[in-house]
């Protein structure tokens, strides 16, 4: 089964790369590359996540985990015996994601096999169902394309580890659940809701005294606490482990992970089978509530959430415009009908999984039900925040071979069991049709803020940066990362499109959009240069006076144009602070 899944997934990657452009790719890959390359430079240090080439003017400190960096660094370190460091890293960026795909495929194959227990398929039907399953995982599989070095592929593996552990059950399953949950949190916080659903299911099973649940919970608790503490020491160090970073793995989350795992594990270990559900609930609730209250008291700044750092101006002009933070309606408005159809197809298939779960529940097997609910929570959340789309697409199809096998066997009550799922699928199809009929097409009116974000100056010559002394460069967010890649050592940019760079983004919005000369002078005071790419569409000078002028190729008082060695749309200006208007 593994060979079929992995071979199909690799074939999908090959098809994706035939045009030389990855279907899945964004600025996260670029910043991850910069972070790893800086780590491998003489200035890099394992526990130091500051990136000096981003100066707002305070140096940007990355929230991203060294856990994701580790395999790239390890591969590059080995390849340094044969290649220069820069080339070794490039090879690592292309080699590791497909290698990680093998781990994902192994988890998928083992989970699908266990879900099929008690069912049978012909060899041809099994192979075809595995191929179809992998194809339906498209958005997840493509996260493992060569060069896709963002953290989402590791998150998908961590979540699949939880699913595999829930389906497996027992001590080994518990170890997988705890490790997957801890690894997911070490990587980032976006999957915490799904982890909470999985553990909520375990708690319900514990209250209902489901067979082997105590073994599962004790193993999961030991695994979670162990992986959490080891990860803290290995990836953020002692100082990072006691620091408060509301948007990254640090003291608040270490406390909660270790605290809740201890409460769950101790209760499951010391209580016997005769303990009633109310006593079990009380034993969990009292210390659990105390832990939450204590965490809120110790870390009050985290009550505003991981994005509390974003100032109102940056939230309005940047965060609220990010497509990943919008509902699935954005897919329709932006003409991304393929993604909308993929979500609808996954939702329709999810309905057909329910009879399989009912069959497993009659066998007193509740792990698959919890796994399903976890994946369903990701699917539901995707309807409101599309950044989650990769998770249900990657996880839900694992039930497909078992569903096909059950439908092939046509057990007693087959027609009745699948009547409701068929109705649900028909309703989803009807709702999708109404979506297209009732919702009028929306034409977005682009403005200067959109131009500043979209203008990346592709295929332009940045060599003018080689002709001036290093310094701080004020840039629109769209060309921030291209400037970093092109600039010699010593240059830094004022902002990048990431939430921790919110102070820098606000400063850049003040620079390019204000009509107040004094505010512009104050915002540009720490900087030496301004860089803007000529843009073919005319920006409204009333909305963004400085950007409209420079993007249109005009000059500005107090900005001295640096002549480029070759014709280029990339423009660099030296700041004359005394004459700046």
Image: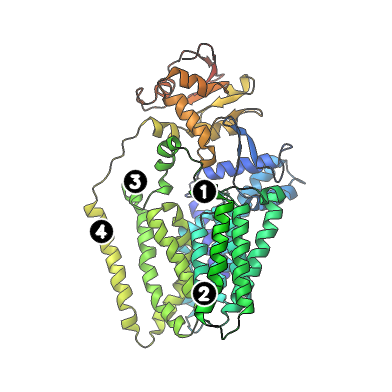
Residue 231, compared with residue 31, is above or below; it is below
Residue depicted at 28% across the width and 63% down the height: 429
- Give the labeled residue for mark 2: 281
Q: Is mark 4 on a helix, strand or loop?
A: helix
**Label 4 vs 3, first from the N-terminus:** 3
Check contact, mark 1 vs mark 3: CB within 8 A: no
Q: In this view, does 331 lie to the left or right of 565?
A: left
Marks 4/1: CA distance? 37 Å
Check contact, mark 4 vs mark 2: CB within 8 A: no
Percent x, y of residue 195: 52, 63
**Label 1 vs 3, first from the N-terminus:** 1
Q: Mark 2 or 3, which is nearer the eye?
A: 2
Percent x, y of residue 482: 54, 33
Q: How crowded is mark 1: few (under 14 residues within 10 Å), some or many (20 or more)?
A: some
- Give the labeled residue for mark 4: 433
Q: Mark 4 or 2, which is nearer the eye?
A: 2
Q: Is residue 458 in view?
A: no
Q: Which label number is shown at residue 171?
A: none
- Give the labeled residue for mark 1: 306
Q: Residues within 10 Å of mark 3 (few under 14, many from 20)?
A: few
Residue 326, compared with residue 546, is above or below; it is below
Q: Mark 2 or 1, which is nearer the eye?
A: 2
Quarter where residue 181 is shown: bottom right
């Amino acid at each position: 089964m593994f060979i079929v899944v992995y071979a199909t997934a690799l074939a999908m990657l090959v098809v994706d790369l035939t045009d030389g452009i990855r279907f899945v790719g964004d600025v996260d890959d670029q910043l991850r590359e910069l972070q790893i390359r800086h780590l491998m430079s003489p200035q890099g240090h394992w526990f130091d996540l500051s990136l000096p080439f981003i100066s707002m003017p305070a140096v940007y400190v990355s929230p991203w985990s060294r856990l994701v960096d580790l395999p790239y660094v390890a591969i590059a370190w080995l390849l340094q015996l044969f290649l220069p460091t820069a080339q070794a890293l490039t090879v690592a960026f292309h080699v590791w994601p497909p290698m990680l795909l093998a781990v994902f495929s192994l988890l998928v194959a083992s989970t699908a096999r266990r879900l099929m227990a008690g069912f049978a398929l012909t060899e041809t039907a099994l192979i075809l169902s595995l191929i179809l399953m992998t194809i339906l995982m498209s958005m997840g599989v493509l996260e493992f394309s060569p060069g896709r070095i963002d953290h989402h592929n590791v998150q998908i593996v961590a979540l699949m580890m939880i699913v595999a552990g829930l389906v497996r059950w027992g001590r080994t399953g518990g170890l997988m659940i705890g490790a997957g949950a801890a690894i997911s949190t070490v990587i980032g916080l976006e999957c915490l809701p799904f982890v909470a659903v999985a553990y909520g299911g375990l708690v319900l099973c514990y209250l209902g005294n489901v067979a082997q649940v105590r073994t599962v919970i004790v193993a999961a608790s030991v695994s979670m606490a162990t992986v959490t503490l080891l990860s803290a020491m290995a990836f953020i160090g002692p100082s990072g482990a006691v620091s408060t970073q509301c948007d990254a793995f640090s003291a608040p989350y270490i406390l909660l992970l270790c605290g809740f795992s201890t409460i769950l594990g101790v209760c499951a270990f010391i209580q016997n089978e005769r303990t009633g559900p109310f006593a079990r609930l009380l034993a969990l609730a009292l210390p659990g509530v105390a832990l939450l209250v204590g965490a809120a008291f110790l870390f009050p700044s985290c009550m505003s959430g991981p994005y509390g750092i974003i100032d109102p101006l940056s939230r309005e002009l940047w965060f609220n415009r990010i497509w990943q933070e919008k509902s699935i309606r954005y897919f329709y408005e932006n003409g991304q009908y393929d993604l909308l159809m993929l979500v609808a197809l996954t939702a329709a298939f999810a309905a057909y999984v329910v009879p399989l779960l009912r069959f497993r529940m009659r066998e007193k097997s509740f792990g698959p039900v919890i796994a399903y609910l976890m994946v369903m929570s990701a699917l539901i959340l995707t309807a409101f925040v599309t950044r989650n789309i990769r998770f249900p697409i990657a996880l839900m199809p694992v039930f497909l071979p078992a569903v096909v096998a059950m439908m092939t066997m046509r057990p007693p009550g087959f027609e009745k069991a699948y009547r409701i799922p068929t109705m649900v699928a028909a309703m989803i199809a009807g709702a999708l049709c109404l979506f297209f009929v009732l919702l009028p097409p929306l034409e977005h009116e682009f403005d200067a803020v959109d131009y500043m974000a979209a203008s990346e100056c592709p295929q332009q010559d940045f060599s003018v940066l080689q002709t001036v002394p290093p310094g701080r460069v004020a840039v629109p967010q769209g060309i921030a990362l291209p400037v970093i890649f092109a600039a010699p050592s010593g240059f830094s940019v004022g902002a990048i499109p990431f939430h921790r760079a919110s102070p820098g983004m606000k400063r850049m919005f003040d620079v390019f959009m204000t009509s107040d000369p004094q505010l512009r002078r104050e915002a540009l005071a720490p900087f030496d240069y301004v860089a803007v790419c000529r843009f073919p569409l005319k920006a409204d000078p009333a909305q963004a006076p400085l950007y409209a002028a420079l993007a249109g190729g005009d000059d500005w008082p107090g900005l001295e144009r640096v002549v480029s060695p070759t014709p280029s749309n990339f423009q660099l200006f030296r700041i004359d602070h005394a004459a700046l208007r």
